[in-house]
Image (spheres, rainbow, N blue to C red):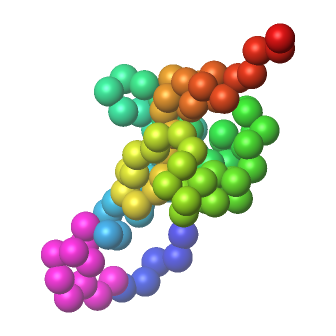
């Protein structure tokens, strides 16, 4: 990380910088939790479930897809809600 002065003009500037730093540290350790549940980034969803990040983006733009939350401006998915969304699309053969 580069050491350089930071100029803040508003409290929002400080909040943005702190949130970005916190998210960076948490993500680098694979550790996003909400109410005791681990949250997945789009990249992790892609790795674990094979749903492309671009597909998730497209679904969000359409207002469809799995429920998500934002943490420091980052979009995160709760595993149980993601699996519920996948199960809802399941087709039973006749």
Residue 13 magenta-highlighted: yes
Spot occupied by residue 83 in the image (x, y as percentages of width and height): 59, 25
Name above or below for residue 75 compared with residue 88.
below
Residue 28 appears in the figure: no
Q: How many labels does the image show?
A: 0
Q: Nearer the viewer, residue 62 or 30?
A: 62
Name above or below for residue 27 compared with residue 79.
below
**Relative to 9, is 16 on the left or the right?**
right
Q: Which of 31 and 70 is in front in this view?
A: 70
Residue 92 appears in the figure: yes
Name above or below for residue 59 compared with residue 47.
below
**Relative to 54, is 20 on the left or the right?**
left
Spot occupied by residue 14 in the image (x, y as percentages of width and height): 25, 72
**Relative to 86, is 76 on the left or the right?**
left
Q: Nearer the viewer, residue 35 or 10?
A: 35
Quarter in which the N terminus is drawn: bottom right
Name above or below for residue 8 compared with residue 58.
below
- Image: magenta residue range: 6-15
Name which residue lies at 60% across and 25% down. Answer: 88
Rendering quarter of residue 58: bottom right
Quarter in which the C terminus is drawn: top right
Q: Nearer the viewer, residue 41 or 32?
A: 41
Spot occupied by residue 11 in the image (x, y as percentages of width and height): 16, 75
Residue 75 magenta-highlighted: no
Spot occupied by residue 4 in the image (x, y as percentages of width and height): 43, 83
Q: Which residue lies furthest to the left in this view?
A: 11
Q: Which residue lies furthest to the top in this view?
A: 94
């Amino acid at each position: 990380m580069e050491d350089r002065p930071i100029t803040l003009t508003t409290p929002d500037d400080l909040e943005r910088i702190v949130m970005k730093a916190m998210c960076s540290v948490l993500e680098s350790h694979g550790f996003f939790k909400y109410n005791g549940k681990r949250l997945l980034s789009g990249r992790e969803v892609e790795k674990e479930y094979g749903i492309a990040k671009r597909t998730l983006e497209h679904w969000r733009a359409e207002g469809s897809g799995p429920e998500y939350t934002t943490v420091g401006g980052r979009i995160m998915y709760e595993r149980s809600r993601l699996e519920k969304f996948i199960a809802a699309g399941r087709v039973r053969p006749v």
